[in-house]
Image (cartoon, grey):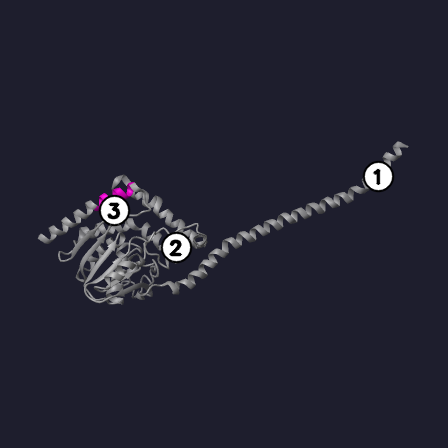
Amino acid sequence: MEHLVSFCKDEAYQCCIPEVESKIARVKEAQTKGIFAHILTACKVLLAVMLIPPFLNYAALQREGSLLQPEGEMYDIGWGQKLFLSCKGKGAPTVVLDAPTGMTSDAWTVVFEKLAKYTRVCMYDRAGVGFSDRPYYNSTEVDGTDSGRNYRNRWTPFTAERMVEDLHQLVSRSSDQPRPFLLVGAELGALIAQFYARMFEGEVMGLVLINPLTEDLFQQDKGIWIHNWYGHMVPSFQTIQLGAALGVTRLSLMLGYLQHPLHRAVSLPDDKYLMCYPKHLSSVVDEHYFINETFSQLRTAKKIKNIAKNISVTVITGNYYDEQMPGPLNKKLKRRYSLDGEVEQTAWEDSRRN
């Protein structure tokens, strides 16, 4: 009897096996579909996170570009490239303000308004920076009729030679500003002013060099400057540029996680715009990246030609180069500015005596 009951139970179990296996298969299939559904949902969310911020940033930039452009005009300097220039006031000489490395004409906003009360003053954005077009590469054919006259085919973008030619095209030809010029430049702008005075000395009556970078900077202090420049500054700007391209920078600024690196006394409305503008930030990176080539060009220019004796040179130095720079570097540069200022002033005085 017990054997019969056991046999019946086994038969019942055997009858249930197909149904149980079918249920298990359905459960596994449902679990698999659930996993794929979760993965698909995660991919959709990730895709949205990757695409929506850049799209919204691009749309915002298109809207802000026309609204935030400072008072001034876009001048064609040749072959379709346009640079932003703002001029105000009357009188002589015409003061031309050139901003520090990687910065726009906004750096001169306060100075610009004060100087305009006494004389004509102009400030501009270098190629690719702020509201100016990026440099064009070889816009004419190599064997074309215009190739010999197109200086873009001769000089590397974002170096002093190219920037000086751009500035000359802008103030002397495209906008035809009244001469003579008093060139006021800070850091990289000071190098451009020195180079301009050598190339177009008939247009310049004086130079004011504010915290000028020196062409031998990277050879000094056992390489500490070149290490900081290319090991810290350039990668930092590249990171900011990438963040802007991905739309992360705008989102971080909106949420308060990121602050503008320039702690200005006067807040400008286009600060956030430029921080989120990949084209501008790409040019900021390029100005820093090619600075060593600019140093080389200035060394060569000094060997070929001195600044004319009738051009006055004034060097103004401050206590600090950059508040974001480590303290020891600021102290080293402060000392170097003082020494370079004395050398420049002595050399100019000697040239006047001769």
Residue 329 belongs to magenta span:
yes
Of labels 2 and 3, earlier in sequence is: 2
Total tally of numbered discs in the picture: 3
92 lies left or right of 12: left
Instruction: For marks 2 and 3, give the one nearer the viewer.
Output: 3
Tell me the SS state at disc 3: loop
- The residue tagged 3 is 319
CA distance for labels 2 and 3: 27 Å
> Residue 246 at what x, y percent from top left?
45, 53
- The residue tagged 1 is 11
Residue 54 belongs to magenta span:
no
> Residue 42 at what x, y percent from top left?
57, 50
Furthest residue in direction top, as rendered: 2
- The residue tagged 2 is 275
Instruction: For marks 1 and 3, give the one nearer the viewer.
Output: 3
- Near mark 1 (Cα within 10 A), the count class, few <14, some 14-19 or many ≥20, is few
> Residue 216 at what x, y percent from top left?
24, 45
Amino acid type, label 3: Asn
Residue occupying the point 35% across, 48% down: 234
Q: Write down the region rendered in magenta.
A: 328-337
Circle on res. 288: none
Residue toward you, 131 or 306: 131
Amino acid type, label 1: Glu
Majority secondary structure of magenta residues: helix
Amino acid type, label 2: Met
